[in-house]
Image (spheres, rainbow, N blue to C red):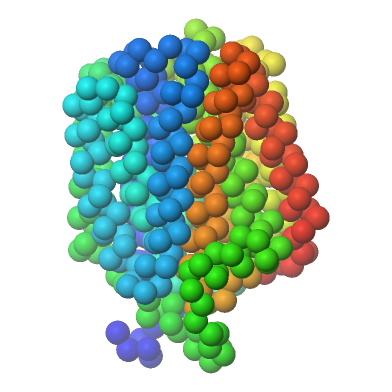
Amino acid sequence: MSIQAIQHGILENKSQIILQLMQVFLVGLAIGMTRVVIPGLADTEFNLGKQQFLLLTSFVVVFGVVKAVMNLLAGRLSDQYGRKRVLIAGWIVAIPMSFMILYAPNWNWIIASTLLLGVNQGLCWSMTINSKLDLAQSNQKGLVNGINEFSGYAAVAIAGVTTAYIVNLIGARQGLFIFGIMVIVLGLFSSIFYIKETMPWAKLHQRGKPLMPQQSLGKLFIQASWHDKILLSLNQAGLVEKFTDAIVWIFLPVFFLSKSLTLIEGGAIVSVYALVWGGSQLITGPLSDKVGRKVLIVGGMWLCGLGLLSIPYTDNVFLWTLEAGIMGIGMAMLYPTLGAAVADFAPVETRGTLLGIYRFWRDFGYAVAALTLGMAAQMTQALTAPFLLASVAMIVSGLYVLIRLPNRKN
């Protein structure tokens, strides 16, 4: 494609933007189907006792480590080989996942299938946002992150409720298999035949700007993870916010089962969190372009912390639903804004890599959170401890961002 035929902007590239939103929606469905069912499956199918918290968290630890590494590699690979190839590879890797869940003889197979899910999420979700950032104008980064995360997390919510109903009708393994295969095949087919390579748009963003010296992944990683205090503050916030998501993924379904709620009732509350998170990002993403990133990041971290703190001390469905919604609003404030803030401070020629480094630390947070929260629950033999620990982590992390991040709007 000639450089003259390329224009930046969401409206100017609306067809590809819509197709990319469909891609991230499918990626969200793939992870959403595990949010409610897998923790329940651990108890009903594999007899993991309610006090075996570290075993319960093992699948999220594996997911977090693998997705973190894939995010890091995906950013670099997409800068070198293009976004579309990496996207297609992510869907191909996911194909065996549903079969492994269907025929799993033990919990280790579920962990292995989660490994493939981590690869899929790291490659595919990263490419959907990278591609939309390529297509959009430079002053649309917050809006792009907002609509991308809305689409993905709306799908997470829909998948959580849908799979809970399907599982109730035909069984956990069969339900996840049918749902998963449909999502993966549709994602692979559409990425091959309908998605365009957006590297030409990325190169146009760099036109007229001075070329930066080529830096190795290792040097960029050290720079972004330690020396650059602004990126460090954003990376640590990305890691710590996964304490909230790990609670919702691992401990909320178990907590609700312990309170005699059904899988469908617990799944509905968890889906409120994801749906509010997803929908609110349509507001918070573009809002961060206008009012700045800092206030939304810090406020979101603290709101999530307060929501986490309140859940174990309430005892009815209405309040749990309200608290899930509050945490969803907090995540909507911080999640797209963190990614947009990283893009603010990332040179265009290394943006894919620096965003990959941010996503590495963000999703490595799943592993850190799952291990830390699992150990807290194991040592205390109480479900209250993970909620309290996660709440403190969110509040302290938000304070660090308040101190370190400049009041820069874009």
Decide which of 164, 356 is in the foreground and name it.
356
Res 268 seen here: no
Q: Is residue 302 above or below residue 35?
A: below
The spot of residue 282 in percent (x, y) is 55, 52
Which residue: 46% across, 42% down? 64
Residue found at the very far top of the displayed protein: 260
Q: Is residue 381 above or below residue 93?
A: above
Which residue: 54% across, 26% down? 374
Which residue: 55% across, 43% down? 365
The spot of residue 143 in percent (x, y) is 56, 61
Which residue: 51% across, 40% down? 366
The spot of residue 28 in percent (x, y) is 39, 44
Question: Which quadrant does the C terminus fall into?
Answer: bottom right
Decide which of 366, 82 is in the foreground and name it.
366
Image quadrant in which you'd find residue 159: top left
Query: Left or right: where does residue 269 sit relative to residue 230?
Result: left
Query: Left or right: where does residue 262 sit relative to residue 86?
Result: right
Q: Is residue 364 above or below residue 17?
A: above
Decide which of 139, 384 is in the foreground and name it.
384
